[in-house]
Image: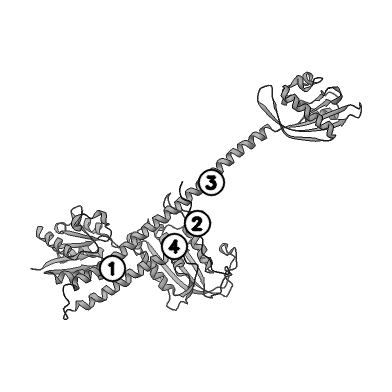
Amino acid sequence: MAHKILLIDDEAGFTELVKMNLEKNGEFEVEIQNDSTKARETALSFRPDLILLDIVMPGMDGGDVQAQFQSDPFLSKVPIIMLTALVDSSEVSDGAVAQSGSSIVLPKPVNFPLLLRVINEAIEAA
Amino acid sequence: MKKVSVVESVLDNLPVAVFAKDANDDFRFVLWNKKQEEITALQASKAIGKDDYALFSKESADYFRSVDKAVLTRGKLLRVPEEIIESEAGHDIHLRTVKIPVIEEETGRRLIVGISEDITESVKSHKELESLNKNLRDANEELQETQLQLIQAEKLESIGRLAAGIAHEVKNPLAMLLLGVDYLSQGIDPEDDNVDKILKQMREAVERADSIVGGLIDFSSQQSLTCEPVSLTNVVDEVLLLIKHELTRSNTKVEVDIPKNLPQVYLDLPKFEQILINLFINAIHAMSESKHPRLEIHARTEILDKVAKNEGARKYEIFRTGDKVVTLEISDNGSGIKSKDLHRVFDPFFTTKATGVGTGLGLSVSRKIVELHGGQLTVKNRSIGIGAVASIILPTRLDSGKVAEKPSIVSVPAESGKSAK
């Protein structure tokens, strides 16, 4: 059964590539939302199993979106993986994974095999 | 009223001390006016008929006597710019004295007439002034050094921020490249439609990263002012890309309105980009409190019909009526410029930002660069709505403006700079 992933990031080129890679490497159905202000609406109708969320975005940034999702009974239960170009090497410990509250943060450029692993683990854990 | 002579009256009321000694009578005092009484704290009755040795210390008296003798020898007026006597009270009195040898008409006596001004206060003030002056000079030096330090810090800080912004902007294309490589390294299936899409995106990603880094190299280069014909649209787009991170972070909406048929202008690209970056960032900061920050960039062609005398054209005439120019306006919807600050915005080091946030060099350097281009930079509040607008007027003639014979390096203070002690 395909897992649904919602990808929220303002970079259209980036999101397309992530989608292509995910769909090639697993049973994933990927929905893209480049406009963070529409993220909640899209999430509620798409009902993803996991959310990939960029941090620096115009309109609402990743932090705002995450806070917004926390207040929704369904969305607050969906695991979120945050992606960012802002993390510098000192914040990244082994496995190239950092924690932000209860979310996992992955630095960009994204190490795709790592991303896959983290996605699968998160979906399983949920 | 007692009957007195005019001379006596004058002597008694003069604000300067007047005295006289009889050279033939051991230099004893024969005249001692009221002011002299005041200065020396010695009554005339105690002084007349006595000589310096009876009234002053031996040291002082020796000195006075030597001056008196010199006056007699010279036979003419002698000025003593400053001499110090000790008052009865114990503190020093500074006097400026003139001594004149006189042969008294009535008696034929050889007199030495002395006129003394009490300059103690003046000397004291002078010393205080000098001390204050020195303090001021020291403070000024310190201030200048601090300013240089601030410029350095601001440069580093803005370079830091620029670097962070650029790093962010470059990481995105890199991420796309990596994802493309990840995808393709799993084997290229000729039936896969995605492959073409991915390759195209990878190519674009490289071009984008290259343009950002290229912009950075231009920004830091130290070339002299060399101009080339450019299209303003391209320049504006490039700069917007360079500061994309700041725009995103501040949630600023950008509106660009540059007509397609705008004539080309002659610009030193890296230097001009420096100006635009400065103006755009200023605008973003001015809108930091706005809920909907909007940066508007308009350009148009104009034929000047009225060239007003303007401050920026101090050194040379830049434009003449009838000139065809390109006007670039950068507007924000921030809080605008306070009227009291309007005429100071171009002063070096003037800034309205809090201490530690920017040194205010940007506008003064920007204006200088625009003027070297034969153009004009002005800043004022919008006539409609709130916010400020910066206008850059650029000539379309290559030979506009009587600029320096050879294009010169724009000198910016503290390139290497005096560093902190």
Q: Are marks 3 and 2 on the same chain?
A: yes
Q: Secondary structure at mark 3?
A: helix
Relative to B345, say whether B374 is above or below: below
Give me the C-alpha separation between circle 4 and circle 3: 30 Å
Q: Earlier in the sequence, mark 2 or mark 1?
A: 1
Location of mark 3 (residue): B140
Q: Secondary structure at mark 4?
A: helix
* Amino acid type of the residue that numbered disc 1 sits on in the rendered structure: Pro
Residue indicated by mark 4: B279
Q: Nearer the viewer, mark 4 or mark 2?
A: 2
Marks 2 and 1 sit apart, C-alpha to C-alpha, by 36 Å
Q: Earlier in the sequence, mark 4 or mark 3?
A: 3
Q: CA distance from mark 3 to mark 1?
A: 49 Å
| Residue at mark 1 to residue at mark 4: CA–CA distance | 27 Å
Q: Position of residue B8 (x, y in %)?
A: 83, 27
Using the numbered discs, state the Cα–Cα distance from disc 4 to disc 2 in whole angstroms: 20 Å
Residue B173 image label: 1
Residue A70 visible within the image: no
Identified at 73% across, 25% down, the residue is B60
Instruction: Check disc 3 and give the amino acid type.
Output: Asn
* Same chain check for tags 4 and 2: yes
Q: Residue at x 10, y 57 (%)?
A: A125
Give residue B231's position: percent from left, percent from top. 44, 75
Badge 3: few (under 14), some or many (20 or more) residues near its Cα, within 10 Å?
A: few
Disc 4 marks a residue whose amino acid type is Leu
Q: Which badge, 3 or 2, comes first in the chain's sequence? A: 3
Q: Quadrant of residue B181?
A: bottom left
Q: Earlier in the sequence, mark 3 or mark 1?
A: 3
| Residue B80: image location, x then y, percent | 75, 34
Element type where label 1 sits in the image: helix
Q: Name which residue type carries label 2.
A: Pro
